[in-house]
Image: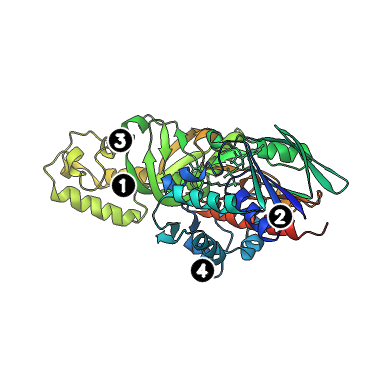
Amino acid sequence: MKRIAVIGGGASGLMAAIAAAEQGCSVTIFEKTDRLGRKIPATGNGRCNLSNLSLGQEPVTDEAYHGSAKTLFLPVFTGFDLEKTLDFFRSIGIPVRSEGERLYPYNLQAASVIDALRDRVERDPWIEIRLEQEVRGMQSSKGRWQVQTSAGKASFDAVILTAGGKAAPQLGTDGSGPKLAEATGLHVTSLSPALVKLQLGSPYCKRLSGLRLDACVKILWDGKVIRTCTDEIIFTDDGISGSAVFMVSQAATTLLEQRKQPMLELDLFPEMEAEDLFILIRQILDSVSWKPILEGLNGTLHKKLIPVLLKETDISKDRTSSSIKDGEIRTMIGFLKHWKMKIIGHGGFKNAQVTAGGIDGTEIGTDLQMKRFPGLYAAGEVIDIDGDCGGFNLQWAWSSGYIAGKNAAEQKG
Ligand SMILES: Cc1cc2nc3c(=O)[nH]c(=O)nc-3n(C[C@H](O)[C@H](O)[C@H](O)COP(=O)(O)OP(=O)(O)OC[C@H]3O[C@@H](n4cnc5c(N)ncnc54)[C@H](O)[C@@H]3O)c2cc1C
């Protein structure tokens, strides 16, 4: 019987083990922490956004994915698509519901997803689970793979590397996956945090901390817009967070790693053209003409933002609403639709949801086997592919895990 090692018992590792065992292989999962799938309860703010409905609509594209291995998404996903993913989850007792395009377990509890996955692998007679066994090296010799763990050596017909990236090291992923790949001789692209909050060089963050609103966020470099997203933003003590920021963060962190200076631009009225906003503000200020401007804008802008707007546009807060000239309103609109701030840092891997970078896409075939290392497969975040917010990273973990497991099992010895 074919023996397969799965290195890392997270989302992709569990799927790889299940798929390989379904093909009749004997599978050993090596997990360095004391629990399988430690990250899953933390996903989706404890609700586990496990996929995205847009991946069920034709034509499916890879536009939600980034990185040198992005082109692997479509061939891999075709083999284990949204329908198969949802069928799988139903088969282990997890029906799914949608909120907008985001898919969650029906009870909105991430813990039940990992409970069901654990139960599925623990009951499988072909899967052996070795907890608290860190893999420290792997080597191919005479068509077999030797795996060196904290508890000794073992030999396998194939190895599937599913040890994740570097994001959220407190949940087990401290970068040992990419290091193992590199030590084996694979090219690994540089790692940076993605889906992470950004630190801003702005004196207003503390004052605005906690403020949530929908905005269009742009990352600029060298005067050009390189990434943009409209969704929720949340000001923090030292910067900005929220799904719109997460979506564009990878572009900023990559530039920062390259010691380049990205800028962040906010459009606080993304749904309105500048001219419509001008008409709105003019009408509002005229209808409350006697009020000080600080109060006059109260119903139009969040209260915390008005002093910032007045300071940035040099308008005294004591002036009456009617005294504000058209030109001054246009200056205000320039700020509200193009508020630029320096990005001076990011939340680091500790606060990131995903790792950008990993095993270079040129090393990997569409069967997820390493082209230069027969018998070595990879899946999940250890590969240089990262998805947008919205369930795309877990979908990649489920699909790539399943396909790597199936192909490793079917590979001719
Ligand atoms: C807070 C948070 C929220 C998130 N929310 C979402 C969400 O809602 N939707 C979404 O799509 N994505 C989300 N993600 C991203 C998603 O969880 C990951 O992309 C996905 O879990 C990656 O799966 P993986 O199997 O590749 O790696 P992981 O799930 O990280 O698993 C890797 C496993 O390998 C183990 N390991 C590492 N090194 C070794 C070694 N040397 N030997 C043995 N074992 C090892 C680790 O302990 C870990 O258990 C979130 C991430 C975080 C941190």
Mark 2 to mark 1: distance in Å?
54 Å
Mark 1 and mark 4 lie on one chain; the one further toward the N terminus is: 4
Mark seen at residue 57: 4
Q: Nearer the viewer, mark 2 or mark 1?
A: 2
Looking at the image, do the residues carrying marks 4 and 2 touch, with CB atoms under 8 Å apart? no
The residue lying at 31 percent from left, 31 percent from top is 207
As drawn, is 375 to the left or to the right of 114?
Answer: right
The residue lying at 29 percent from left, 39 percent from top is 305
Mark 3 and mark 4 lie on one chain; the one further toward the N terminus is: 4
Badge 4: few (under 14), some or many (20 or more) residues near its Cα, within 10 Å? few
Kind of residue sitting beneath label 1: Arg
The residue lying at 52 percent from left, 49 percent from top is 227
Mark 3 to mark 4: distance in Å?
43 Å
| Rendering coords of residue 141 (x, y %) | 86, 43
Q: Nearer the viewer, mark 1 or mark 4?
A: 4
State the residue in front, 331 or 372: 372
**Farthest bottom residue in view:** 58
Q: Splitting the image into 4 quarters, where does residue 180 fall?
A: top right
- Reply above or below: 60 against 398: below
Quarter of the figure that contains the C terminus? bottom right
Mark 3 and mark 2 lie on one chain; the one further toward the N terminus is: 3
| Rendering coords of residue 362 (x, y %) | 74, 51
Residue at the disc numbered 2: 368
Quarter of the figure that contains the N terminus? bottom right
In this view of the protein, can residue 264 be seen by the observer? yes
Q: Nearer the viewer, mark 3 or mark 4?
A: 4
Mark seen at residue 330: 1
**Label 2's element?**
loop
Kind of residue sitting beneath label 2: Leu
